[in-house]
Image (cartoon, coloured by chain):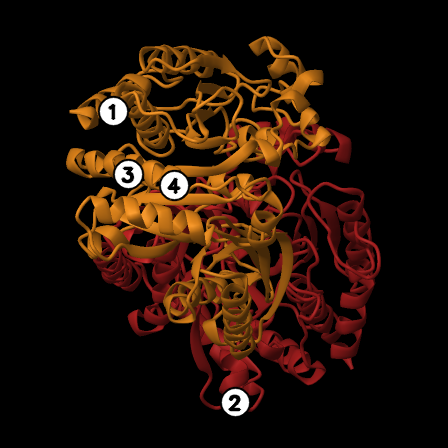
Chain colours: A orange, B red
Amino acid sequence: MNSRIVLERCDELAAISALPDGLIERTYLTVEHKSANATVAQWLTDAGLHAIWQDAAGNVCGRLEGERPGLPVLLLGSHLDTVPQAGRYDGILGVLIAIEVVARIKKSGRTLPFALEVVGFGDEEGTRFGATLLGSRALVGTWDPQWWRLTDADGASLREAFAAFGLDPDAITRAARRPEDLVGYLEAHIEQGPILEQRDRALGLVTSIAGARRMLITVTGRAAHAGTPYAARRDALAGASEAILAVESLAPGLGLIATVGRIGAQPGAVNVVAGSTTFSLDVRAASDEARDAGLEKLLAELKAICARRRLSLSVEHTHAAETVYCDPALKATLAQGVIATGDDDPLELFSPAGHDAMAIASLTRVGMLFIRCAGGVSHHPEESVREDDVALAIDAMHAAVLSLAESYEPYEPETARATG
Amino acid sequence: MNSRIVLERCDELAAISALPDGLIERTYLTVEHKSANATVAQWLTDAGLHAIWQDAAGNVCGRLEGERPGLPVLLLGSHLDTVPQAGRYDGILGVLIAIEVVARIKKSGRTLPFALEVVGFGDEEGTRFGATLLGSRALVGTWDPQWWRLTDADGASLREAFAAFGLDPDAITRAARRPEDLVGYLEAHIEQGPILEQRDRALGLVTSIAGARRMLITVTGRAAHAGTPYAARRDALAGASEAILAVESLAPGLGLIATVGRIGAQPGAVNVVAGSTTFSLDVRAASDEARDAGLEKLLAELKAICARRRLSLSVEHTHAAETVYCDPALKATLAQGVIATGDDDPLELFSPAGHDAMAIASLTRVGMLFIRCAGGVSHHPEESVREDDVALAIDAMHAAVLSLAESYEPYEPETARATG
């Protein structure tokens, strides 16, 4: 069974880790990254690909030519890096499914009207240098020279890490692809959410990848002695707590997925009522319009909560990314793939989490297939998938690639960019 | 009017500050401390006291002898130091009222069967070195030699600060008094709460000074990607927020004054659901029994909240102080004083905040008089009192001292310590 091989390879990569005791951490430009690339390159070799290389950004690639050499390429891939104390499937599973799909096509002897490439991105999570999607942004050609000065926890700069890894920072633009050389990009990924499980589906079609908006919210009251009775308090932390609970309770009804992950109270003394409290807010939705409309209502509610408590609330917007829409034609192609596995009416859902496809959509059209994961748990050692779901994902992706080959007409990148 | 002088002196001391723009900060063993002591010493001189000195801990003192020199002494006082961005009455007002009371008795020519001393403690707030009540603990003789190594924000040790102030650290025990030399300790202080204002009273009798219990509470869930849907989350910060709101809503019904002043979420990233959140809890009540019983119920509720959210809750107890009870006889004496001002049925209340009297109760019996402050606001520039309330406080304290003199029998310290 190909699914068994894929899961065994997930286990094998999980063992390439900077952490002891079976915990997984594999970050950009580390010895673990080098080792994972070498391992994946061997599997690409075993799959019989025509060319295997590491690109100028440290992404590992393998190419199967189409009917003739040099045709535009359909990219299949995901990332090989992890967060700290990660699961073993986020990203990795998509790379290994891509290898299996290309191996199956190679083995069948069938040639396609486009080339296929597997890409294992070196950085998507941003764990080491803070900035995310470094691998796919190098491929897209949107590498920001400011990033060279980013440093890791040990003070090593991204530029230094490139050199230490054996890469030439000045050659980074060589990792960039041209739109006219591409047919599109397909990515399989665990859902990182419980919707497929709740709906009893193995696979789902991604409609869009949510662009997050992030902000810092500061609730201001008045610092006071811990002996101060409640009636006299204007407790910023109590107000922030009510606001955080309101975020949790109101977000679903507003079509939002919202997260408060960081908080601090000032002056921050055990025996002083907080005079101010600042917390982060990350908001995502199926579309930018839905997100912004929901956010406006949410912030109005938070302000009302603070006003009732004689507190003020201020918002500092720190980040806004546009939602990326998957290409309708590639979504239809992936739907054909899912239907071929026996699911007549594939479920569509949006991705609240960012993915490599998000960066690649600025270069070529993208399609994403989600795979059920247990309990929606991700970025955690308990992350898990079913072997039969993985088998279905390989089958669906394989069928989608063949379906795309059958209907293939040389792709017009300009149109794709308009919808991307 | 004596009350006018007292308020003008509060303003004069407020100008002795380490902060610009009218903000007040005056901390232990600083140039501001030295200047405040000199100013207060001048006022003690103006009051005609027999002896004025700075003790071995930097407390400023003035003594009016009784019917003959060397009699046991009734201490009257409070502290002269402040928190950062303080009000101008917390502590200071009690020292200045004490000066007025002693001045009035001196002026009347009346001699008492005990001596009177005014004490202006150099440290109660603990702003500079973290440890509180340093002035009164030196007077009590419970100075901890470990404190010498405490450092301020600039790295100066308490020992170095002593030397810089012109004090001899090795002479600290000379600040300690003996119980047999004392009649008791009376302190006037702003309420730092709104109860007197709510009950329309100028003055109140303190029954006890609450001993705080402090702890760190850690709520543990599971870190997860910000894209994770709500159903799959075990969000420690959302759980902590619900717990903090429950502290606020349940504490009054449990007879507690509870404060959460510090909080942090881990991993603390904008785009990661918190895996754990730790917050502080400070709990006070009228008695240790009420506090501990209320706390037990409160923690049970917090655990239930966490259990419903599939979170765990752990408690690390970091501090516990016993409640200090004011001496019934001194409370009755202060009641006589308040009744003399026209309030036939003085209100009794406990102090959720700590005071110098708390330390001194381990040496001699203590009594405390609370003075109404606007809105219960303290430790803040908006701290304010009414001049007519200050006049009543001076009258009440004066009447109480005379009442004590009339009923005075040489005090038995052993009994006092049993009730203290």
- The CA span between labels 1 and 3 is 18 Å
Q: How many marks?
A: 4
Q: Which chain is home to disc 2?
A: B
Q: Quadrant of the C terminus of chain B?
A: bottom left
Q: Secondary structure at mark 3?
A: helix
Left or right, B41 with reference to A13: right
Q: Amino acid at mark 3?
A: Ala
User: To which residue does mark 2 refer?
Assistant: B343
Q: Secondary structure at mark 4?
A: helix
Q: Say yes or no: labels 1 and 3 on the same chain.
A: yes
- Viewer-nearest of discs 4 and 2: 4
User: To which residue does mark 1 refer?
Assistant: A6
> Looking at the rendered structure, which numbered label has been put on residue B141?
none
Q: Tags 4 and 2 in contact by the CB under 8 Å rule?
A: no
Left or right, A170 with reference to A281: right
- Viewer-nearest of discs 1 and 2: 1
User: To which residue does mark 4 refer?
Assistant: A404
Q: Residue at x 49, y 33 (%)?
A: A124
> Looking at the rendered structure, which numbered label has been put on residue A399?
3
Residue A400, x across and y down, in percent:
33, 40
- The CA span between labels 4 and 2 is 92 Å
